[in-house]
Amino acid sequence: MSLHEASFRLRHECPYREISERYPDLTIREWYLSDCQVLEITSAEAPTDDLLEEIDGIGTILHESVDDSGLHVVTQSCLCALEGSILERFEEHNCLYQPPTIHRQGWEHYTVIAFDEDDVRALFRDLEADRDVELLSKAAITEQHVPHSMLAPVDQLFEDLTDRQLAALQLALENGYYEQPRGTSLRELASQTAVARSTFEEHLRKAENKLLTNAGTYLRLVTSGSAANSLRAGPSGPSEQRAD
């Protein structure tokens, strides 16, 4: 048996989505607690007074900082009624919601896990009936890998990355920099920012190094005792001719 993980984004009427659409450099991460919502709001750009006023109206501000790295705010607000919400629809189709919800550039990003791929298909048919939905990824999680997937919280994978490093990483990803062949170059990416190419490259390389270092622990868990070790040379050295 295997689980199935699906990530997708959608558009519908939501105050947080509307804010993220008006301020495209903004990222809002949303967590549900028992009686409230916690929002982490970040941006690599300096916020305007209008944006700060909107954020202040969302709820109680628990943390706020504005410096050279950009904006970082954590707020707490009353839990909106979940009756008829998208979370209920996940449950109706036996899909487990994986927080946080991420609001960016007018889209809400979700990840769900299901025991049956047909449940994921049924969920998408349901959502497509009244929402603009776009599938980002879908994959089977084999039984032996389930514990590892649950032990890798996103916040730990991106720990110690600054907002500017995250922004550089996201810009590179969205523009096809990591595709083969590459969809863009460092020079083209830097031209979309307000920093020099060398500065942008420094942000990107540091982000890559930190991300891989943070992921290393989980990588070792996943590959422990697996066929991945077959790439290593045996006692007698390489057994086949290099083809690259």
Image: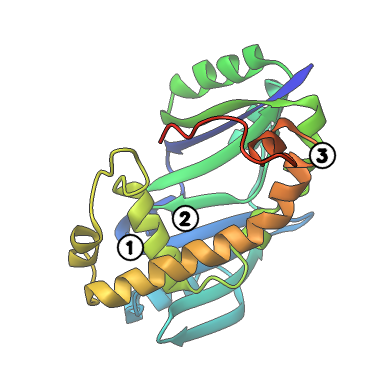
Q: Residue at x 23, y 55 (%)?
A: 185
Q: To which residue does mark 2 refer?
A: 16
Q: x%, y% of residue 209?
A: 52, 65
**Rendered image: mark on residue 147:** 3
Q: Residue at x 41, y 53 (%)?
A: 104
Q: Nearer the viewer, residue 30 or 202?
A: 202
Residues at marks 1 and 2, CA–CA distance in whole angstroms? 11 Å
Identify residue type, mark 2: Tyr
Please say if 6 is above or below 54: above
Residue 85 appears in the rendering: no
Identify residue type, mark 1: Tyr
Where's the N terminus, which quadrant? top right
Circle nearer the N terminus (3, 2): 2
Residues at marks 3 and 2, CA–CA distance in whole angstroms? 32 Å
Residues at marks 1 and 3, CA–CA distance in whole angstroms? 37 Å
On screen, residue 109 versus residue 86, left or right, reads: left
Please say if 179 is above or below 190: above
Q: Residues within 10 Å of mark 3 (few under 14, many from 20)?
A: few
On screen, residue 29 versus residue 66, left or right, reads: right
